[in-house]
Image (spheres, rainbow, N blue to C red):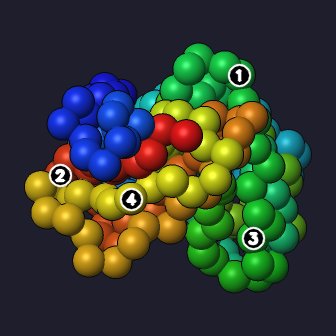
């Protein structure tokens, strides 16, 4: 992610304001990373036919198939963050007997594999997809995001920002606008 120092800052800010391009994330998809896998009655580790996220972003797991076979399991995702550091995340549990998606909080640049515990029956499926939470690519000890831009226009609603001074993957931004392949830029104070 390119970071653009702003040498034209005023009021003593100098180069403390940065504009960061987060890329042009595609529309989130429940199967962007891996198509639905049918339950086998035993734990499955999926490591083939995986498509890495288009930009560092949060992942989703989607339970489908026969509703009565869906168990409140938690999918574990393994991969790397934007710096190449190894990360893992246990996603929230599915709702028992109900199809639907859960969303993680870490921004994955790559997905190495994911682990699916067994459901209640072999009619259930689990897919891995992408979410609208996009990795910022810098460590933030507090929310210093000033503004977010989508497709060249400033967002009227402030984005939801998650921060972590220690875990790069936990620094994410979720804009009010849904990703559609347009560029996202955030301006922030480099504190």
Q: Secondary structure at mark 2?
A: loop
Q: Which residue is mark 3?
A: 94
* Label annotation for residue 182: 2
Q: Which residue has dot 4 on it? A: 146
Q: Residue at x 31, y 59 (%)?
A: 148
Using the numbered discs, state the Cα–Cα distance from disc 1 to disc 4 in whole angstroms. Answer: 29 Å
> In this view, which residue lies farthest toward the left?
152
Query: Do the CB atoms of the residues marked 3 and 2 lie less than 8 Å apart?
Result: no
Callout 4: SS? strand
Residue at position x 87%, y 46% in the image: 42
Q: Earlier in the sequence, mark 4 or mark 2?
A: 4
User: Sequence-wise, which precedes: disc 1 or disc 2?
Assistant: 1
| N-terminal-most mark, 4 or 3 | 3
Identify residue for label 1: 86
Q: Is residue 188 left or right of residue 64?
A: left
Residue that protrudes farthest toward the top in the picture:
84
x%, y% of residue 38?
65, 53
Specify whether 39 is left or right of 111.
right
Question: What is the secondary structure assignment of the residue under circle 3?
Answer: loop
Calculate the distance from the C-alpha at mark 4 to the C-alpha at mark 2: 20 Å
Residue 166 appears in the rendering: yes
Q: Is residue 41 left or right of residue 166?
A: right
């Amino acid at each position: 992610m390119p970071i653009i120092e702003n040498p034209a800052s005023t009021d003593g800010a100098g180069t403390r304001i940065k504009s960061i391009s987060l890329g042009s994330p595609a529309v989130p998809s429940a199967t962007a990373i891996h198509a639905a896998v049918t339950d086998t009655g035993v734990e499955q580790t999926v490591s083939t036919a995986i498509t890495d996220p288009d930009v560092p972003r949060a992942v989703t797991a989607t339970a489908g198939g026969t509703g009565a076979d869906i168990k409140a399991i938690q999918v574990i995702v393994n991969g790397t963050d934007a710096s190449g550091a190894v990360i893992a995340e246990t996603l929230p549990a599915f709702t028992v007997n109900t199809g639907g998606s859960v969303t993680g909080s870490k921004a994955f640049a790559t997905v190495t594999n994911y682990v699916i515990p067994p459901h209640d029956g072999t009619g259930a499926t689990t897919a891995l997809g992408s979410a609208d939470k996009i990795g910022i690519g810098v460590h933030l000890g507090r929310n210093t995001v000033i503004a977010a831009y989508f497709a060249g226009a400033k967002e009227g609603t402030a984005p939801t920002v998650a921060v972590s001074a220690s875990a790069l993957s936990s620094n994410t931004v979720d804009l009010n606008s849904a990703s559609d392949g347009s560029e996202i830029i955030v301006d922030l104070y480099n504190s």
